[in-house]
Amino acid sequence: MIMARPKPIEEIIDEIKDFNKVLIAGCDGCVTVCEAGGIKEVQVLASALRLYFGKERKKLEIDETSLTRQCDKDYLHELLDKIDDYDAVVSLACGAGVQFMAEMYRKKPIFPGVDTCFIGVTEERGVWAERCQACGQCILASTGGICPITRCSKRMMNGPCGGSEKGKCEVSPDTDCGWHLIYERLKELGQLDFFAEPTDPKDWASSRDGGPRKIVREDVRQ
Amino acid sequence: MRLRYPSNIKIIKVPCTGRVAIIHMLKALEEGADGVMVAGCLEGDCHYQSGNLRAKKRVIYVQETLEKIGMESERVAMYNLSAGDGPRFAEIAREMTEKVQELGPSPIKKGKKKTSKKSKVEVAA
């Protein structure tokens, strides 16, 4: 899922300091799982902001809410009746949620409360790691279920490169070499013949090269 | 034992300091407490294995947040003591109260009509 981290509170204070009434809106989706933008984080941020503005003797009313998903119009509609009560909204959803809210409520300033980072997994509580770059053409079937686009720092299709040492990437001793992982996994699966022939260059047309992407599926479209 | 400790302390009992969330400490400050003291079991002695260690991390988080918003981080503190050590509880209660009194009233409540001369400390124990 999409991973994010909370923005520094100083940045959020700076965004909203000139308003009188602000809504902090969380998202019950991905950002709740990575503990950056769910209802708990909304409550903590709102409380800290009230402390700050209380200390500064600035009358700024701060309310809290959280929507099931901010990347879905049906749930964003839940704010329709009350959004006009606020001068601005701080959305703790991912970048997609923030933008979708801004699209729906065009006259309302919508500020991001988190920095959206990547599509990843929860390795353990408090440790989230990138696993997918949404390149649009999945090659995991041939690479032992390990993505070279994500796990190799150079996104190489034929690795490892000369920077791989003892299973680690030259970028950082804390970073596994993606191609070392692929080699070890294919060895376990008895599929090392994958390395006998070079892999063709990747078709990046399905990635970001064509600008913002869109999926239109007539079979499910209404 | 009839031990004396400052009467301006309001005790909030929880089963384990692991139950004390970040929002509880922030809310206490928001509602006008001058300080918040979390009193947990000795490290390594938690009846629920690691509740006091979780609380410790949360207290540090709140202290860091207070610093970021320009408030004294000393208004929130974590103490570790045995559940049977009454004299030590009275001692840390006095210590925390003195520390908070030195800091003065919470900057949050200066604008309110009623301001107690005594400092108010909330304890989660």
Image (cartoon, coloured by chain):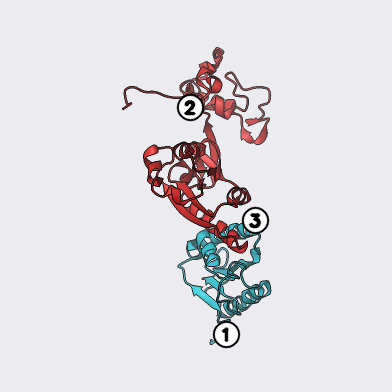
Q: Share a chain, discs 1 and 2?
A: no
Q: Which mark is residue A145?
A: 2
Secondary element under disc 3, as helix, strand or loop, is helix
Can residue B21 be seen here? The reply is: no
Q: Colour of chain B?
A: cyan
Q: Are marks 2 and 3 on the same chain?
A: no
Of A155 and A54, which appears nearest the observer? A54
Residue type beneath disc 1 = Arg
Q: Dot 1 surroundings within 10 Å: few (below 14), some, or many (20 or more)? A: few
- Above or below A159: residue B28: below
Q: Position of residue A92 (x, y in %)?
A: 50, 45
Identify by letter the chain in red.
Answer: A
The image quarter in which residue A162 lies = top right
**Residues under labels 1 and 3: Cα distance?**
36 Å
- Which of label 2 and label 3 is nearer to you? 3
Q: Secondary structure at mark 2?
A: loop
* Total number of numbered discs in the rendering: 3
What chain does mark 2 sit on? A
Residue count near mark 2 (Cα–Cα under 10 Å), binned few <14, some 14–19, many ≥20: some
In terms of sequence position, does the residue under pointer 1 or pointer 3 come before the other?
1
| Mark 1 touches mark 3? (CB < 8 Å) | no
Query: Based on the displayed image, in which of its 4 quarters is residue B88 positioned?
Result: bottom right
Image position of A9 (left or right of A80): right
The residue that appears at 62% across and 49% down in the rendered structure is: A14
Q: Which mark is residue B4?
A: 1
